[in-house]
Image (cartoon, grey):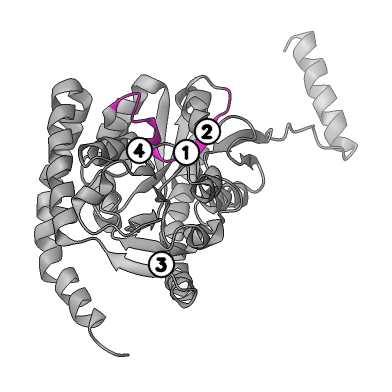
Amino acid sequence: MDRRSLMKRAGIAGVLASGIAPAVHAQATIRWRLASSFPKSLDTIYGGADVFAKAVRAMSGGKFEISVHPGGELMPPFGVLDGVQNATVEMCHTVPYYFYGKNPAFALGSAVPFGFNARQMNAWMMHGNGRKLMNEFYAGYNVISFAGGNTGTQMGGWYRKEIKTPADFKGLKMRLGGGLVGEVMQKLGAVPQSIPGGEVYQSLEKGTLDAAEWVGPYDDQKLGFNKVAPFYYYPGWWEGGPEVDFYINTKAYEGLSAENKAIIDAASALANADMLAKYDALNPIALKQLVAAKTKVLPFSQAIMDASFKAAMEVFAENDAKSPEWKKIYADMRTFQRDQVLWFRFAEARYDIFMSSQKL
């Protein structure tokens, strides 16, 4: 044994004999920032990021901290994808169709007119090709996606006047959530507007908007839309089951340990389920309150639904021609949806129709 090895062993023996344990370097806490596209006042849709961040912290024993920042605090609500792509922040919480202008395929990661309901969206993403295809597409933007919530089928929006026929959309200035439904509405004659949720009330109040859609009764009531637009239509045929997503910078995600990647996966699954359950629990109460406050809740006519479906199919065909990414993912989505619609006709739809006619 050489002299240096003898001294090293003697040193360690001395430390142990003295009762002092060798220093152990604690794992450094990971700190990320999450930019939301939503205002903090919307505890349902914004709250999904809070549920996620709290779950990550709890499962990591406080070793993985994610701070959540409302839309506009770190960057504009519609600028969060760029923020993640450029590594300004590690992740964001947003709706993919906000970025339809970059490529139509973004909308397929959330909702398209006459697309999936929430359960069908989960089925396609988790047990079809949905997540695989979308993440292949998102790789071009340096992000990876995880489900971050779902609102369920949305309402069709608030209108300052009645909408009885497709012709009533002509010239209507309407706030819409994504560019895809805007293109469909343009075929009906409407003038789509892209405005963050926090700015819609003032626009309706001033008359710079004739109509607006957001989500459903709980959020819409909090935003006060019933005070400035008395007619509330359903259903929101453009959002049958819109997925809200977490986008994570690819390099940041790949830098995580296998354990922390599993935590991200589990926390996103919790946030996804929690948001939908919360909307389902709160929307009925809010709807009853809106009706009590003299809101006129009305269905879109069959003529409007038919005209909207026809217009949507025209836009989808145009997207097939201009975006190969859209064409590939959309074809897979519709193939999966055909079987879903077939199955839901038998058990779910029949059961729901029967129960909606019963008095409990």
For marks 3 and 2, the one nearer the N-term is 2
Task: State yes or no: residue 297 in magenta.
Answer: no
Q: Is residue 115 visible?
A: no
* Residue 234 quadrant: bottom left
Q: Quadrant of the N terminus?
A: top right
Which mark is first along the chain, 4 or 2? Answer: 2
- Cα distance, mark 4 to mark 1? 10 Å
Q: Is residue 246 or residue 170 the one in the foreground?
A: 170
Tag 1's secondary structure? Answer: loop
Residue that carries the numbered disc 2 in the rendered image = 91
Q: Which residues are magenta?
A: 88-103
Q: Which of pointers 1 and 2 indicates the residue nearer the eye?
A: 1
Residue assigned mark 3 = 280
Return the residue at label 1. 195
Give the alpha-carbon distance from disc 3 to disc 2, as whole Å.
27 Å
The x, y position of residue 64, in whole percent, is: 62, 40
Q: Amino acid at mark 2?
A: Met
Pointer 4 residue: 192
Q: Earlier in the sequence, mark 1 or mark 3?
A: 1
